[in-house]
Amino acid sequence: MAVRSRPIIRALLIDISGTLMIGSTPTQRAVRALAELRRSGFPFRFCSNTSKESTSVLQKRMVDAGFEVQTGESPELWTSLKAVQSLIRTRGLRRPYFLLSEPAKDECISAGLYDADVPYDAVIVGLAPALFDYDHLNSAFRILVGEDDSQKGWNEDPKASIPLIALHKARYIESSGHGLALGPGPFVAALENATEREAEVLGKPSKGFFETVIESLDCEGHDPEGCIAVIGDDIQTDLGGGAIELCLWRILVKTGKYRAGDESRDGVHAPDEVCDSFAEFVESLLSARFSKQ
Ligand SMILES: *[C@@H]1O[C@H](CO)[C@@H](O)[C@H](O)[C@H]1NC(C)=O
Ligand SMILES: *[C@@H]1O[C@H](CO)[C@@H](O)[C@H](O)[C@H]1NC(C)=O
């Protein structure tokens, strides 16, 4: 169902979990739809807020589910973990406190600056169900307010400078086979509330994240005419924030964590289009393109 009439679309940003696949199962006809999109030469990128698994584990899960994913020079898969790695490097962070799953943490540490002998200099939070308890959250809180033992005796006022960084702030997620489950958002909010500051959000839907992904498309010299579209199952995490600021064409799919009425809930910016599935959107995109030629 098109809410407004669709403009010319020049590239597509694709959410993975809930849109392309749920757990390790592709959504209906998604594998074929993606293959058709690729065959038609239509530019696209995968965008994931994944913080539970590393980029390479996610990529393997996609490939195992039947999707082709290009790596190398211009990788197609963009995750918030990649964004964190580049932030660790540009800010020169040497010892973040990670509330992250093991594989995600390893990926961040491989940014190469980690030094266990200096005081904690950041708190980085992603989806880490095993660590979301009082002790871990309290450690994060104490680091943010400069009360951690590692920070004692260092000259600088640690409190002023320790950033709270969130990979994303999804309030809840769709866990495969178990329905809705708590995301990292409420835990980040607890730290924000206790420290009276706002987290920097690196992944979707931050403007910076979308801009980086779009730049990677533009680098390939694609036609700059037309709109960039973004497709996902979460009206806020996938299609909110930066997607609105950058005037992307926003398509909500009715798979994954979508629940009836999400598109017209109070306080949400209504999507430009609502589709039953990723495949349905791709089919209509390609047939519109074909009929124009
Ligand atoms: C990321 O957001 C999507 C919504 O598109 C959600 O389905 C998914 O579970 C989230 N992933 C994590 C790791 O929180
Ligand atoms: C923290 O949460 C309480 C309860 O909701 C609220 O009254 C207070 O304004 C919040 N403080 C901050 C700094 O967000």
Image: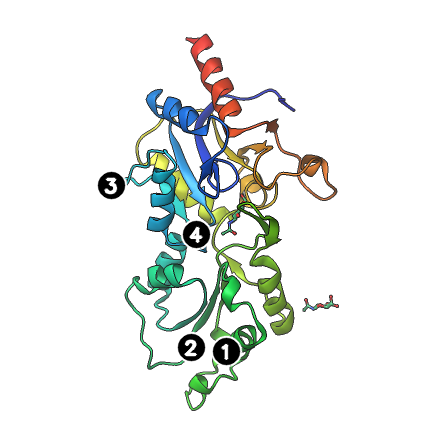
Is 209 in front, or is 37? 37
Residue 189 picture quarter: bottom right
- Secondary structure under tag 1 reads helix
In the figure, 148 relative to 169: above or below?
below
Q: Residue at x 50, y 28 (%)?
A: 28
Residue denoted by label 1: 143
- Secondary structure under tag 4 reads helix
Q: Residue at x 61, y 29 (%)?
A: 272
Task: Give the mark, 4 or 1, whose residue is nearer the N terminus.
Answer: 4
Q: CA distance from mark 2 to mark 3?
A: 34 Å
Q: CA distance from mark 4 to mark 2?
A: 21 Å
Residue 204 visible here: yes
**At which x and y percent is residue 264?**
72, 36
Residue 150 picture quarter: bottom left
Q: CA distance from mark 2 to mark 1?
A: 7 Å
Residue type (three-letter) at the residue carrying disc 2: Tyr
Residue denoted by label 2: 120
Q: In which quadrant is the C terminus drawn?
A: top left
In the figure, 60 relative to 84: above or below?
above
- Secondary structure under tag 2 reads loop
Q: Tell me the crowding category of disc 1: few under 14, some 14 to 19, or many 20 or more residues within 10 angstroms, Cα based.
A: many
Judged left or right of residue 75, residue 292 is: right
